[in-house]
Amino acid sequence: MTATSVEPTRRDFLYIATGTVGAVGAAAALVPLIAQMNPDASTIAAGAPVEVDLTPIAEGQVIKVFWRGAPIFINHRTKKEIEDARKVNVASLPDPQSDEKRVKSGKDQWQVLIGICTHLGCIPLAHSGEYNGYFCPCHGSVYDTSGRIRQGPAPKNLPLPPYKFLFDSKIRIGEEDAAKV
Amino acid sequence: MMSGHSTYQPQSAFMKWMERRLPIAGLVYSSFVSYPTPRNLNYWWTFGGILMFLLGAQLVTGIILVMHYTPHADMAFNSVEHIMRDVNYGWLLRYLHSNGASMFFVAVYIHMARGMYYGSYKEPREVLWILGVILYLLMMATGFLGYTLPWGQMSFWGATVITNFFSAIPLVGESVVTWLWGGYSIGNPTLQRFFSLHYLLPFVIVGVVVLHVWALHMVGQNNPTGVEPQSEKDTVAFTPYATIKDGFMMVCFCLVYAWFVFYVPNYLGHADNYIPANPSVTPTHIVPEWYYLPFYAILRAIPNKLLGVIALFGSIGILAFLPWLDTSRVRSAKYRPLFRQFFWIFILVTVGLGWLGSKPAEGGYVLASRILTFYYFAHFIIILPVLGWVEKTRPLPNSISEAILNEGLPLGASGPAPTATKN
Ligand code: HEM
Ligand code: FES
């Protein structure tokens, strides 16, 4: 056999074309098989926004509400907690973010967080840990009063849910302020 | 060696008729009756049979449990209590199943340690060994899925932590986890798919066991000397010799199994799992089932999420490469004085990791986990390759029979030693 390869024939073309169509068909057949596992319509509908009245939450109190099956912490922070969160050197944090970016402007006392540890999903305990913020009992991640990761295996700050203030004492979780984003 | 053993001779007219159409009796006969096994196998070789028995037991008890169990987030917990209180012998079937899973892991760990001690993973048994690693992974997955089914606190939070491993995948992690859950958190869709898969995987295990045994019968069993059988003098027929020995050990093993089931049925479980799943409270101390503890300790030893998850999977995956990481040409630890010590250190380190996995992740426990995790990997990546080069091994016997003779058991001293039957 020398380098002069045989000319591609029409049969070769047919083989390749048939094979390609077959592969595309098989891939297309996988789509429903895989997609069925994603959240279904009822789960998505159940994940609609929820409204929370803030009036009963006293200063220094944290309440938990559920949105999309996830606990949302609403922390009515004290002056001291806000100060503690603001006096750190942001650049030195594992996941640098200023406290101002983690609350709505002018609503510094209201901190709304998804209470799911960014390590492996446990629910941290409020008002505990070295920074008196949140402490995750599962593998020992420590968050500060802004919900930022300070120590332990969790890689990220506690995430913020989309939410907006309807008025001063009511928020809607699951919807972002259109004007502000 | 494979060609040496006798073949099946059908006796009755019906079996002769059958054998020409579906030679299944012949297959069973040559695999489990006349199959030649090394004559020096010790009791550590009985755990393969025990594993097959336990797989059967899990299938039978599991299929019965499904007749009474309800895979729904609102009803699963109560249906398990219904099994425990209302169903006739339901408590027994459930305890057999939950303790059976633990016994399954006891047996597989002994079975794997046996393979590591006697070098059973070495040429030509690499594929056999890798199929074993796959079986072990499938067992781990099945056990995990099963443990979520009672939908107690540990079920729920164990499932949360384990599925979140996948959130460590860069970029697509979160979407993968949502896809696994079928929701924004663990919920009913998760339970239902886990139930479906918990039913499926044991049958996949059955399939891989068939491949495992097939591969075993291609290359033959290893034995305590690690020297391949040379002649018929080195082997005995599977039946009655291996069947009796396997059967005896199986009975002994069942005594232990029964002791757990009847005397301490919840000893290996967690009290928290008798509290219905509550998505708003994480138990203060989450620990997985005992059989995952060493790997859990490795996960927690590493302060970085992604690397922790990689180390966890790596610590299991590395087993598949063992045939190539161990560079020694001598199989059995019996003739490897240094390896033998390192083997036991490795066992102690793994048990130590298991103990650490059950402790809270703080202070000295974390430091100790880091040291042992380092050693665990060093055993495979540094110690085994280097040992193969530097170790001075003891001289190997020329054959299995010679090894037995040298140990002061002359042939004929207590009647002729059994040899492979030649019918
Ligand atoms: C490789 C074999 C298997 C293993 C290792 C295994 C393991 C487990 C484990 C650890 C549990 C949790 C027990 C508890 O804490 O209550 C469980 C539960 C369950 N398994 Fe399996 N299983 C196996 C095979 C099967 C099969 C073949 C079926 C059905 C076809 C099945 C059906 C169930 C059901 C319905 C439950 C929930 C009831 C309960 O919690 O007791 N399992 N399994
Ligand atoms: S889940 Fe919170 S530290 Fe691991």
Image (cartoon, rainbow, N blue to C red):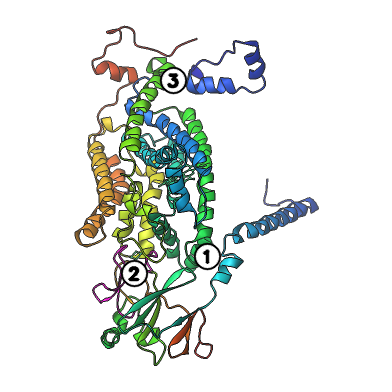
Q: If the image is split into quadrants, where does the N terminus of chain A sit? A: top right
Q: Which chain is disc 3 placed on?
A: B
Magenta highlight on residue A123: yes
* Type of amino acid at the residue the image marks with label 1: Gly
Q: Are marks 1 and 3 on the same chain?
A: yes
x then y, percent, for residue B181: 50, 61
Q: Is mark 1 within 8 Å of ligand 2?
A: no
Residue at (45%, 40%) from the top-left corner? Answer: B90
Relative height, residue B163 to residue B146 (above, below): below
Residue farthest along the front direction in this orientation: B86
Q: Does residue B330 appear in this view?
A: no
Mark 2 element type:
loop
Q: Which chain is disc 1 placed on?
A: B
Q: Is mark 2 within 8 Å of ligand 2?
A: yes
Say left or right for B82 vs B260. right
Residue at (44%, 27%) from the top-left corner? Answer: B220
Q: Which residues are magenta?
A: A117-146
Mark 1 element type:
loop
* Type of amino acid at the residue the image marks with label 3: Phe
Q: Which residue is mark 2?
A: A124
Q: Is mark 3 within 8 Å of ligand 1?
A: no
Q: Mark 1 or mark 3, which has the lower sequence index?
A: 1
Residue farthest along the bottom direction in this orientation: A106
* Type of amino acid at the residue the image marks with label 2: Pro
Number of on-image labels: 3
Q: Which residue is mark 3?
A: B238
Relative height, residue B135 to residue B1 (above, below): below
Inter-mark Cα distance, 1 to 2 = 21 Å
